């Protein structure tokens, strides 16, 4: 059992957990993830390390409520326990030299943040491009502002309710043209990553994407997380989750991510019904 | 009367005691155990068929050389506890091996009575004893010796090694990546063939011996061999991570939704209980037409699981013929009785995408048996133009595995070019403090071989550390 030491609420749907996990804290790196099984009946779901502290023996992850598991997690409080937490899994992000653009869209911002923070901590100049559909869905703005100056933060919303209206590729292209990008890291919805990649490719800037297919074991045993990279099948949990974004087959990733939409909806609905009944 | 003038005479007229099976039509609808095992009367009757050979070939056929005539004699005399002790001299997991060993290629395959008629049901007799662990005498425990051993992986190899070491007085910690112990025995082999309670009993038994289990511990990431042997203060490490990554068919469409590797399909059900979704959160796909590629135990388990999840048609597609299938014969027979169709002599060419984006059919090449090759086996050769599309909504590939990627990350010892650990008969690796065994050394093999390797490594560790 893994104890929740701290729960931070960033918005209605976005939370951060600090979990007691001394051994994991000693071995975590930016870009790696852990897997959670909330309780005995739970599914195993992956979350990227947001922070960790080997001296104090904890790890943190940030999550957005989108389905049953994340809804269930959001109902847990400090002092409660998570049944199983496994990690670290996956390869750490490789932090090459130069100026970086870190692009995060939607929940991807939770994954982008620790990478940006680690880049800053290791002396890189970093520009963050934060994308969201609308203002309310923009995650972690304050956290990004604690590590980056305002002129290094570029916000876009699809509906123009905040920041500039449009998609992440507009500021991306401007920064590239201004010579502010030696390397790019991106994570978010598939269409966003795809277009961010096309833009980077146009200028020959190396770009890596952190891929988030559905996972079951996270240890390379089942093959559920497979992605197609340069025509070859790779397992995101052990070969990734970071890959050269120019080599990713995006259609394949998108189709596999959507494979359980019906079942996921069913699961969430059943949970919400029970939850409402309890609160009555 | 089997004893004549004080000499044993086997009952040669008695036919082999049939398995105590649940009716096929009923059992194929749920995950209940297919085979209820022998009753005491069945076991004693079957024991009377053994000829108690002076030169028992069955023993040679068993990879761990269990003294088969001895334990069968003890069963005949109703000395069940002693019989179990006899087995335990050589095998730690009779309840499991009695159920899953490919007996027809091993002990029973060599049994003299099999030459004319049916061999003695050695596996069933072994299981009969294994299922009554309370009858065994208490294991002899050596005094604690203050030495610590880390075992990586809780599959049959890891648990056999851990048990033996604990009895030899070592302080043993098993590190397991999953949240529960047993390896393939829990996530791969289905409940209807090997009840999870049987596996749990073995793990609980180890805990009673003082073995510690650290779950959710992916070694190589959480700690490597160097750290275990250094900072963590272990005196030796036994690596038993099993085989790993599924092999690809390498054909177009392999990554379409609803095309599975057997490991995923089986793990969702066995470990995550997707058959009880939405009580359990992990879903799976309940196909109506399911095609499984492969001919081994893994393929059989997948296809029979598909049947139990409600498939109307569950097809096993194999590139050779039934005779060459590496699966246990019992599994093939059970599968067919449950309504599984066998499609021999086909090789898959492509998975086809339906309108909804998911797999809708698999294109196969029909083959026929050609001339015998150098090994004397007739190879399948494509029949020109015989290409066919088999409709399916779930397709599963079960054609084997590659080496577990964590062996390299755990490090500390040499791997061969395929990523398996180099180890000798006793499990010794290039590092004098690291031993390894089971599937991570041999490639995907069997439970009994993995168990045997664990036991031999434990003996070798005991000897090596006693010297220092
Ligand atoms: C390597 C990796 C790192 C991630 N890091 C974060 C993070 O830091 N913060 C965060 O909020 N989210 C992260 N995610 C996504 C997160 O795992 C999903 O949001 C979560 O699984 C949703 O579960 P659910 O039951 O709440 O939703 P569901 O209703 O089950 O699913 C909603 C969507 O989430 C995805 N998903 C569902 N089950 C899984 C699964 N078992 N594995 C992976 N994806 C799944 C699918 O695309 C699905 O359509 C990460 C995913 C991966 C693969
Ligand atoms: C579906 C299926 C059916 C089978 N049927 C039969 C059968 O009928 N008869 C038969 O004899 N054999 C059968 N086999 C083969 C048999 O199960 C294996 O040969 C045997 O389990 C190998 O044992 P092992 O201990 O080497 O590894 P495994 O059983 O694979 O156990 C390895 C364990 O190590 C853990 N692990 C892996 N990496 C790490 C890490 N880095 N850190 C910590 N832990 C780790 C894994 O989670 C796992 O629990 C079958 C296999 C499968 C998949
Ligand atoms: S361990 Fe397997 S091969 Fe050996 S006697 Fe038992 S069933 Fe036969
Ligand atoms: S070979 Fe068969 S008959 Fe002979 S001892 Fe073994 S089991 Fe008995
Ligand atoms: S999640 Fe199973 S192989 Fe990656």
Image (cartoon, coloured by chain):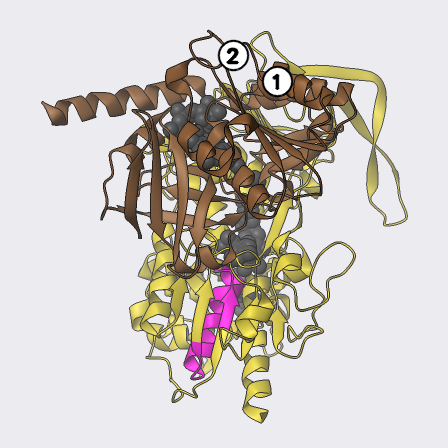
Query: What kind of element bears circle 2?
Result: strand
**Residue that mark 2 sits on:** A164
Write down the region rendered in magenta: B150-171
User: Which residue sits furthest left?
Assistant: A280
Mark 2 burial class by Cα count in 10 Å: few <14, some 14-19, many 20+: some
Can you give x and y, in whole percent of width and height, for residue B349 in the image?
75, 23
In depth, the one of B41 and B426 nearer the eye is: B426
Question: For the point 60% across and 38% down, which residue is it?
Answer: A241
Question: For the point 47% across and 43% down, which residue is it?
Answer: A49
Can you give x and y, in whole percent of width and height, for residue B155 in the image?
50, 58
**Rendered shade, chain A:** brown
**Tag of residue A54:** none
- Image mark 1: chain: A
**Residue that mark 1 sits on:** A171
Q: Is residue A191 above or below residue A81?
A: above
Q: Is residue B168 above or below residue A47?
A: below
**Rendered shade, chain B:** yellow
The answer to whether marks 2 and 1 mark residues whose Cβ atoms lie closer than 8 Å is yes
């Amino acid at each position: 059992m893994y104890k929740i030491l701290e729960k931070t609420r960033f918005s209605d749907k976005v939370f951060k957990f600090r979990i007691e996990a001394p051994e994991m804290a000693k071995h975590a790196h930016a870009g790696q993830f852990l897997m959670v099984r909330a309780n005995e009946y739970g599914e195993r779901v992956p979350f990227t390390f947001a922070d960790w502290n080997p001296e104090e023996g904890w790890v943190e992850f940030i999550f957005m409520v989108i389905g049953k598991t994340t809804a269930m997690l959001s109902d847990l409080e400090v002092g409660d326990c998570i049944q199983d937490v496994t990690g670290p899994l996956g390869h750490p992000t490789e932090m090459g030299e130069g100026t970086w653009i870190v692009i995060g869209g939607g929940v991807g911002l939770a994954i982008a943040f620790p990478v940006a923070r680690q880049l800053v901590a290791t002396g890189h100049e970093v520009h963050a491009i934060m994308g969201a559909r609308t203002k309310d869905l923009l995650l972690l703005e304050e956290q990004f502002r604690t590590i980056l100056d305002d002129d290094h933060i570029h916000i876009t919303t699809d509906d123009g309710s905040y920041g500039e209206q449009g998609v992440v590729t507009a500021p991306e292209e401007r920064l590239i043209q201004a010579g502010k990008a030696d390397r790019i890291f991106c994570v978010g919805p598939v269409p966003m990553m795809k277009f961010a990649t096309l833009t980077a490719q146009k200028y020959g800037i190396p770009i890596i994407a952190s891929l988030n297919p559905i996972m079951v074991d996270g240890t390379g045993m089942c093959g559920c997380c497979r992605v197609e990279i340069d025509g070859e099948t790779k397992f995101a949990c052990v070969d990734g989750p970071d890959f050269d974004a120019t080599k990713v087959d995006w259609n394949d990733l998108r189709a596999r991510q959507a494979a359980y939409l019906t079942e996921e909806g069913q699961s969430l609905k059943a949970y919400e019904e029970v939850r409402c009944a309890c609160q009555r | 009367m089997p004893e004549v003038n004080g000499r044993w005479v086997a009952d040669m007229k008695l036919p082999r005691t049939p398995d105590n099976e649940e009716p096929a039509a009923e059992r194929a609808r749920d995950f209940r155990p297919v085979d209820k095992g022998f009753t005491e009367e069945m076991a004693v009757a079957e024991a009377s068929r053994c000829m108690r050979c002076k030169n028992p070939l069955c023993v040679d056929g068993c990879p761990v050389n269990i003294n088969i005539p001895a334990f069968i004699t003890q069963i005949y005399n109703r000395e069940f506890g002693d019989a179990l002790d006899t087995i335990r001299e050589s095998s730690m997991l009779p309840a499991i091996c009695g159920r899953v060993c490919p007996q027809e290629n091993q002990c029973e395959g060599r049994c003299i009575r099999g030459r004319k008629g049916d061999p003695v049901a050695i596996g069933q007799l072994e299981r009969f004893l294994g299922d009554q662990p309370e009858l065994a005498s208490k294991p002899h425990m050596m005094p604690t010796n203050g030495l610590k051993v880390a075992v990586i992986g809780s599959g049959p190899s890891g648990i056999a090694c851990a048990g033996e070491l604990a009895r030899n007085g070592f302080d043993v910690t098993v590190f397991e990546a999953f949240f529960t112990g047993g390896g393939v025995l829990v996530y791969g082999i289905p409940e209807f063939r090997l009840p999870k309670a049987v596996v749990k009993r073995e793990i609980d038994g180890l805990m009673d011996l003082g073995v510690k289990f650290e779950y959710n511990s992916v070694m190589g990431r959480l700690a490597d061999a160097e750290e275990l042997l250094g900072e963590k203060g272990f005196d030796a490490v036994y690596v038993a991570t099993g085989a790993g990554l599924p092999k690809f068919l390498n054909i177009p469409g392999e990554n379409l939704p609803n095309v599975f590797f057997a490991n995923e399909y089986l793990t969702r059900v066995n470990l995550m209980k997707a058959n009880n979704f939405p009580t359990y959160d992990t879903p799976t796909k309940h196909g109506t037409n399911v095609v499984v590629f492969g001919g081994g135990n893994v393929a059989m388990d997948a296809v029979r699981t598909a049947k139990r999840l409600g498939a109307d048609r569950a097809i096993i597609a194999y590139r050779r013929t039934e005779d060459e299938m590496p699966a246990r014969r019992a599994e093939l027979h059970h599968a067919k009785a449950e309504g599984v169709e066998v499609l021999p002599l086909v090789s898959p060419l492509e998975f086809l995408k339906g309108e909804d984006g998911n797999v809708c059919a698999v294109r196969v090449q029909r083959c026929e048996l050609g001339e015998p090759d150098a090994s004397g086996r007739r190879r399948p050769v494509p029949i020109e133009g015989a290409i066919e599309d088999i409709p399916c909504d779930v397709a599963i590939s079960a054609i084997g595995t590659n080496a577990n990627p964590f062996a390299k990350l755990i490090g500390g010892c040499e791997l061969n070019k395929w990523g398996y650990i180099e180890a000798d008969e006793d499990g010794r690796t290039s590092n004098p403090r690291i031993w390894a065994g089971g599937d991570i050394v041999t490639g995907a093999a069997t439970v009994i071989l993995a168990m045997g390797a664990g036991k031999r490594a434990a003996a070798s560790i005991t000897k090596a550390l006693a010297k220092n």
